[in-house]
Amino acid sequence: MPFDVQDLSGTFSVGDIAIALALSFVLSSVIGWVYRSTHRNVSYSQSYVQTLVILGMLIAFSVVGLSASGLAMWWKRRPQGALGAPPLPADRRLGAGVYALIATFALVLPLVGASLVLVLVLESLWTRMSPSLAASASARAASRRRA
Protein backbone atom coordinates (compact mmCIF):
# COMPACT_ATOMS: atom_id res chain seq x y z
CA MET A 1 0.00 0.00 0.00
CA PRO A 2 1.66 3.26 -1.04
CA PHE A 3 1.96 5.96 1.55
CA ASP A 4 -0.35 8.90 1.12
CA VAL A 5 -0.14 12.16 3.02
CA GLN A 6 -3.91 12.11 3.44
CA ASP A 7 -3.54 9.03 5.67
CA LEU A 8 -2.32 11.38 8.39
CA SER A 9 -4.98 14.05 8.02
CA GLY A 10 -6.12 15.29 11.39
CA THR A 11 -2.83 14.47 13.10
CA PHE A 12 -1.80 18.09 13.65
CA SER A 13 -3.87 21.01 12.49
CA VAL A 14 -2.50 24.47 11.88
CA GLY A 15 -4.26 25.51 15.07
CA ASP A 16 -2.46 22.81 17.08
CA ILE A 17 0.89 23.98 15.78
CA ALA A 18 0.00 27.63 16.46
CA ILE A 19 -1.05 26.79 20.03
CA ALA A 20 2.19 24.85 20.63
CA LEU A 21 4.30 27.72 19.33
CA ALA A 22 2.32 30.34 21.28
CA LEU A 23 2.64 28.32 24.49
CA SER A 24 6.34 27.88 23.81
CA PHE A 25 6.71 31.63 23.28
CA VAL A 26 4.93 32.41 26.54
CA LEU A 27 6.93 29.88 28.56
CA SER A 28 10.22 30.96 26.98
CA SER A 29 9.34 34.57 27.73
CA VAL A 30 8.76 33.65 31.37
CA ILE A 31 12.18 31.97 31.45
CA GLY A 32 13.67 35.10 29.87
CA TRP A 33 11.93 37.31 32.46
CA VAL A 34 13.29 35.13 35.29
CA TYR A 35 16.79 35.36 33.76
CA ARG A 36 16.52 39.14 33.43
CA SER A 37 15.24 39.45 37.01
CA THR A 38 17.90 37.27 38.59
CA HIS A 39 21.04 38.17 36.61
CA ARG A 40 22.47 41.64 36.97
CA ASN A 41 25.49 43.61 35.80
CA VAL A 42 28.26 41.57 34.21
CA SER A 43 26.42 38.25 33.95
CA TYR A 44 23.35 39.77 32.23
CA SER A 45 23.00 39.85 28.45
CA GLN A 46 19.89 41.12 26.61
CA SER A 47 20.76 39.07 23.53
CA TYR A 48 20.75 35.92 25.68
CA VAL A 49 17.11 36.58 26.63
CA GLN A 50 16.18 36.75 22.95
CA THR A 51 18.17 33.58 22.32
CA LEU A 52 16.26 31.79 25.10
CA VAL A 53 12.91 32.73 23.55
CA ILE A 54 13.94 31.78 20.01
CA LEU A 55 15.49 28.52 21.18
CA GLY A 56 12.32 27.57 23.07
CA MET A 57 10.20 28.12 19.98
CA LEU A 58 12.60 26.17 17.76
CA ILE A 59 12.56 23.26 20.17
CA ALA A 60 8.74 23.28 20.28
CA PHE A 61 8.57 23.33 16.48
CA SER A 62 11.10 20.47 16.34
CA VAL A 63 9.06 18.36 18.75
CA VAL A 64 5.92 18.85 16.66
CA GLY A 65 7.88 17.90 13.53
CA LEU A 66 9.37 14.82 15.17
CA SER A 67 5.96 13.70 16.36
CA ALA A 68 4.46 14.01 12.91
CA SER A 69 7.41 12.31 11.19
CA GLY A 70 7.41 9.49 13.75
CA LEU A 71 3.75 8.86 13.07
CA ALA A 72 4.38 8.94 9.32
CA MET A 73 7.25 6.42 9.63
CA TRP A 74 5.12 4.10 11.76
CA TRP A 75 2.26 4.37 9.27
CA LYS A 76 4.57 3.28 6.45
CA ARG A 77 5.97 0.29 8.36
CA ARG A 78 2.92 -0.91 10.28
CA PRO A 79 1.56 -4.41 9.59
CA GLN A 80 -1.06 -4.37 6.84
CA GLY A 81 -4.59 -4.17 8.22
CA ALA A 82 -3.44 -3.96 11.85
CA LEU A 83 -2.30 -1.47 14.43
CA GLY A 84 0.84 -2.96 15.85
CA ALA A 85 4.55 -2.69 15.98
CA PRO A 86 6.37 -2.96 12.67
CA PRO A 87 8.28 -6.20 12.11
CA LEU A 88 11.82 -6.40 13.41
CA PRO A 89 14.61 -5.93 10.89
CA ALA A 90 16.06 -9.10 9.38
CA ASP A 91 19.63 -8.12 10.26
CA ARG A 92 20.04 -8.97 13.96
CA ARG A 93 23.27 -6.93 14.23
CA LEU A 94 21.24 -3.76 13.73
CA GLY A 95 19.06 -4.68 16.71
CA ALA A 96 22.13 -5.35 18.86
CA GLY A 97 23.51 -1.92 17.95
CA VAL A 98 20.24 -0.24 18.85
CA TYR A 99 20.13 -2.08 22.19
CA ALA A 100 23.73 -1.04 22.91
CA LEU A 101 22.87 2.59 22.12
CA ILE A 102 19.80 2.44 24.39
CA ALA A 103 21.86 0.91 27.21
CA THR A 104 24.49 3.63 26.80
CA PHE A 105 21.87 6.38 27.02
CA ALA A 106 20.26 4.66 30.02
CA LEU A 107 23.61 4.63 31.84
CA VAL A 108 24.64 8.17 30.92
CA LEU A 109 21.17 9.65 31.49
CA PRO A 110 19.64 7.95 34.57
CA LEU A 111 16.20 9.50 34.02
CA VAL A 112 16.08 7.93 30.55
CA GLY A 113 17.00 4.58 32.10
CA ALA A 114 14.34 4.93 34.78
CA SER A 115 11.66 5.81 32.22
CA LEU A 116 12.67 2.84 30.04
CA VAL A 117 12.40 0.49 33.02
CA LEU A 118 8.99 1.97 33.87
CA VAL A 119 7.77 1.47 30.28
CA LEU A 120 9.01 -2.14 30.26
CA VAL A 121 7.26 -2.87 33.57
CA LEU A 122 3.99 -1.26 32.42
CA GLU A 123 4.12 -3.09 29.08
CA SER A 124 4.74 -6.38 30.87
CA LEU A 125 1.77 -5.78 33.17
CA TRP A 126 -0.44 -4.70 30.26
CA THR A 127 0.48 -7.80 28.25
CA ARG A 128 -0.31 -10.07 31.19
CA MET A 129 -3.67 -8.39 31.79
CA SER A 130 -4.79 -8.54 28.16
CA PRO A 131 -5.04 -12.10 26.80
CA SER A 132 -5.22 -10.98 23.16
CA LEU A 133 -2.00 -8.99 23.53
CA ALA A 134 -0.27 -11.95 25.17
CA ALA A 135 -1.38 -14.26 22.34
CA SER A 136 -0.16 -11.87 19.63
CA ALA A 137 3.15 -11.34 21.46
CA SER A 138 3.76 -15.09 21.72
CA ALA A 139 2.85 -15.52 18.02
CA ARG A 140 5.37 -12.80 17.09
CA ALA A 141 8.03 -14.43 19.24
CA ALA A 142 7.38 -17.82 17.60
CA SER A 143 7.62 -16.33 14.12
CA ARG A 144 10.93 -14.66 15.09
CA ARG A 145 12.35 -17.99 16.29
CA ARG A 146 11.42 -19.64 12.98
CA ALA A 147 13.08 -16.87 10.95
Image (cartoon, rainbow, N blue to C red):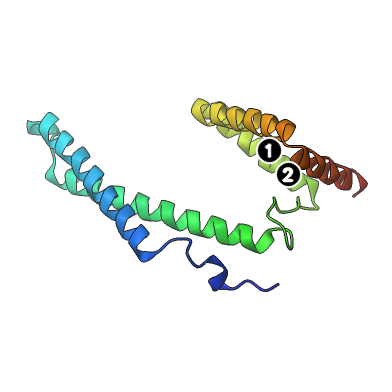
Secondary structure at badge 1 equals: helix
Disc 1 residue type?
A: Tyr
Q: Is residue 90 left or right of residue 55?
A: right
Secondary structure at badge 2 equals: helix
- Name the quadrant containing residue 2: bottom right
Residue sitting at x 70%, y 31%: 124
Residue sitting at x 57%, y 62%: 72
Is the C-beta separation of discs 1 and 2 under 8 Å?
yes
Kindly identify which residue carries mark 1: 99
Q: Is residue 48 above or below residue 21?
A: above
Image coordinates of residue 137 in percent, x first then y, are 79, 41
Image coordinates of residue 7 in percent, x first then y, are 57, 69
Pick the residue in front: 87 or 40. Answer: 87
Residue sitting at x 80%, y 45%: 136
Camera sees residue 39: no
**Label 1 packing within 10 angstroms: few (<14), some (14-19), many (20+):** few
Kindly identify which residue carries mark 2: 95
